[in-house]
Image: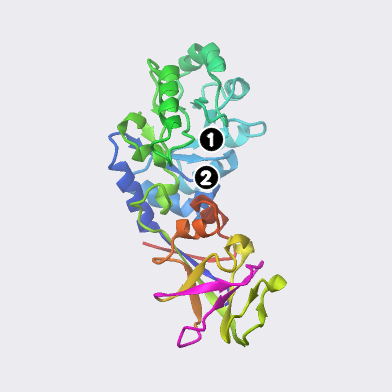
Amino acid sequence: MTTATLTIDTGAIARNWQSLDARTEVETGAVLKANAYGLGAPVIARVLARAGCRSFFVATADEGAALRAALGQGPVIYVLSGHMNGDTGAIGEARLTPVLNSVDQMLRHVEALPGAPFGLQLNTGMNRLGMQASEWSALRDIAVAQRPALIMSHLACSDEPDHEMNAHQLRQFHEMTDGIDAPRSLAATGGTLMGEDYHFDLCRPGVGLYGGLPFADAEPVVTLDAPVIQVRDVAAGEPVGYSNSWIAPRASRIATVSGGYADGLIRALGSGKTQVYAGDTALPVVGRVSMDLITVDVTDLDHDPDHLQLLGPHQGVDDLARAADTIGYEILTSLGHRYARRYTE
């Protein structure tokens, strides 16, 4: 079989959620946007619901509708993009809770779905989503009278706990929301780890659930094993891969592995940047990553491998991310649809 196998440890995801939950005295939700960071939102949502999670966050109404079908009624599903044009049917039918980001969204929601639940997002300095302080001051009394399910903002630099932006946003959030009788939320994974000052009424970890930084104590969640299609001998001085970007410095044995940038193994992981594993033995990737294939120098192995491991106990998503000069989020969410996904507990 030429399909690589992506193994997802759902027990580790549940334990990561429980570990983050144990760090707070407040409710802990879970962010499952982008198909649970590429790992399969329906399966993971049910695992987290069994672990005790009751509040879920997605990016769009379509994601929310799919999650509602998986979870059934009961859990709250927040839509971070708010109430966009064309979303009314999905929000109403799936009983979603849009997190409204502007006066226009507020008007659209109360006119289209009067009495339906909603949350509010405030801009405390990230300047991405949420109401400006001036908007909020004009709308605050009216909005609060509608009894929002949640008032939230988002930290820009929580992966750097000592960054001055964190304290600035915390002050802004207090100034904009103190005295309001509504649940509040500021912390995702990084904010959860920064302590109770950032916890308010609900924390909403995302990447930490899936084994990524900044949750350094997270259990690893994903393993990626790719089959070897062919192994060949290459003479010293011969090239491997596109553009002759790697020239064999010695007589070499080269394995061609099924997987490439179409599978989320981004092109920046090419020659000299990363390695794969045969058991405990690290083997260098040589030549360029192409759409469907990676080439690996297996000269120092005493056998030709059937499979090689790209993600696992020796190399996690953040290790691969550092090699590609990116972040673990990109590696996770890029893991391709061609993998055979296997869920374990």
Q: Residues within 10 Å of mark 2 (few under 14, many from 20)?
A: many
Against 336, residue 167 (above or below) is above
Q: Secondary structure at mark 1?
A: loop
Mark 1 and mark 2 residues within 8 Å of each other at the beta carbon = yes
**Alpha carbon separation for disc pair 1 and 2:** 9 Å
- Extent of the magenta region: 280-304
Q: Quadrant of the C terminus?
A: bottom left
Which residue is label 2 attached to? 33
Based on the picture, tell me whether residue 288 belongs to the magenta stretch. yes
Against 200, residue 273 (above or below) is below
Q: Secondary structure at mark 2?
A: helix
Q: Residues within 10 Å of mark 1 (few under 14, many from 20)?
A: many
Q: Nearer the viewer, residue 333 or 115?
A: 333
Q: Nearer the viewer, residue 112 or 214?
A: 214
Q: How is the image coloured?
A: rainbow
Q: Nearer the viewer, residue 83 or 22?
A: 22
Q: Nearer the viewer, residue 52 or 72?
A: 52
Residue drawn at 45 percent across, 22 percent down: 172
The percent coordinates of residue 137 (x first, y second) are 52, 13
Based on the picture, tell me whether residue 247 belongs to the magenta stretch. no
Ranked by sequence position, the earlier of labels 1 and 2 is 2
| Kind of residue indicated by mark 2 | Lys
The percent coordinates of residue 299 (x first, y second) are 51, 84
- Say how many tags the image has: 2
In this image, 186 relative to 69: left or right? Answer: left
| Kind of residue indicated by mark 1 | Leu
Visible in this render: residue 40?
Answer: yes
Visible in this render: residue 46?
Answer: no
Q: Quadrant of residue 24?
A: top left
Q: Quadrant of the N terminus?
A: bottom right
In this image, 342 relative to 132: left or right? Answer: left
Which residue is label 1 attached to? 80
